[in-house]
Image: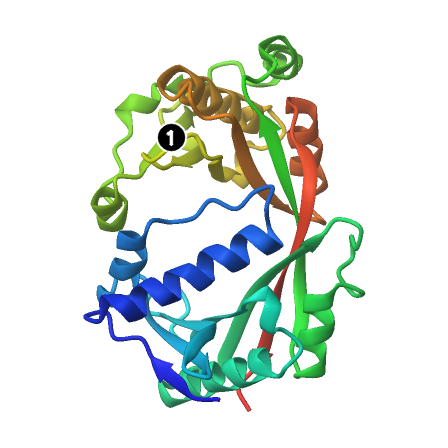
Amino acid sequence: MPIVAVDPNEMDAVAAFHRIYVTVGEADNPDTFVAAPLEEIHDLLAIASARFACRGLLALEDGAPVASGLCALDLKDEPERALLTPRVLPGHRRRGHGTRVLEHLERRAVAHGRSLLQATAVWSSAHPNGATAAPARFAAARGWALALTNVRLRLALPSDAEQITTVVAERAGRREGYTTVDPDAIRDDERHLARSGRVKINAAALSPTGEVVALSSILTRPDGPGPAHQQGTVVDEAHRGRGLGAVVKAAALEQLERTRPDIRAVITETAQDNGPMLALNRALGWVPVLSSGDFQAPTR
């Protein structure tokens, strides 16, 4: 089975890479997958960001692409790390394509001096601990270990405003002197967001001394009502226990629903062992729909 690099200047190859990405995402993750447009995938492969340099490959069977791989080299946070993503079309699985693609990606990472390999996969919530899920079995057979299990949740919109107001109000007494920043006052200048037309909605909480101590962000796409993605909600450790996570999540949601009434859902993901955030998400109306796992392996 030939494996060839994807040349970003060859749009037929980029389109084939994109088709596999979309087909696999819709098959494996129909409830939460939102496809990035072709142009965004092209830019991912063609233009190194401040954080990652990405290269793609295609695996061919009888001349037709049936699998793909993405190797993302971390350039900033952990320069010893590579993020690897093998994908195989559903009708071509269990033929060794995934193994060969993964091995090719591993060799590329090693050639670029990476000593830590990581990958992410999703599976049905019927396998909450991941050990019996197909991606975990595939990874374990190839020397990879499941390092972290996550819960992926979905919030249908419009949200229940009364429910959210109640959750926020229950925590009001613990945050006297804290204020919420108007999300429009926070600017995001990430180059790839601007290039693709994506918009990040931010909400922040300020301490009584004016420091940003909590932040929540939701990422939206301009093309259609597909789910938005709650990228993260973080609270400074010294200011936890005051309900600030609930405040900034609610503020970001309010801004999303006001500015993008066409969006019908928000997806978020939380580590399975993060009990407080899971409880908050459930209280605000999110429901679990999938599990996912972060796998890692040392280079061999």
Judged left or right of residue 230, residue 14 is left
Can residue 252 be seen in the rendering of this structure? Answer: yes
Most foreground residue, 67 or 155: 67
Give the vertical position of 296 relative to 169 (above or below). Answer: below
Q: In this view, does 197 lie to the left or right of 206?
A: left
Query: Can you give x and y, in whole percent of width and height, for residue 139 in the image?
Result: 66, 75
Residue under pointer 1? 202
Q: In which quarter of the image is residue 11?
A: bottom left
Dividing the picture into quarters, in which one does residue 275 lie?
Answer: top right
Residue depicted at 71% across the width and 32% down the height: 279
SS state under label 1: strand
Residue farthest toward the top in the current orientation of the protein: 162
Task: From the top left corner, tell me how far across and down residue 30 is, in percent.
Answer: 59, 46
Q: Residue at x 44, y 24 (%)?
A: 252
Q: Is residue 235 visible?
A: no
Could you tell me which quadrant the C terminus lies in? Answer: bottom right
User: In the image, what residue occupies the spot 62% across and 11% down?
Assistant: 169
Q: Relative to 222, does residue 205 appear above or below in the rendering?
A: above
Instruction: Give the image location of residue 10, x and y in percent.
Output: 22, 71
Which amino acid type is marked by label 1? Asn
Eyeballing the image, is 300 above or below 214?
Answer: below
**Residue 269 drawn at (x, y percent):** 59, 44
For residue 9, side relative to residue 40 (left or right): left
Above/below status of 231 relative to 24: above
Q: In which quarter of the image is residue 223?
A: top left
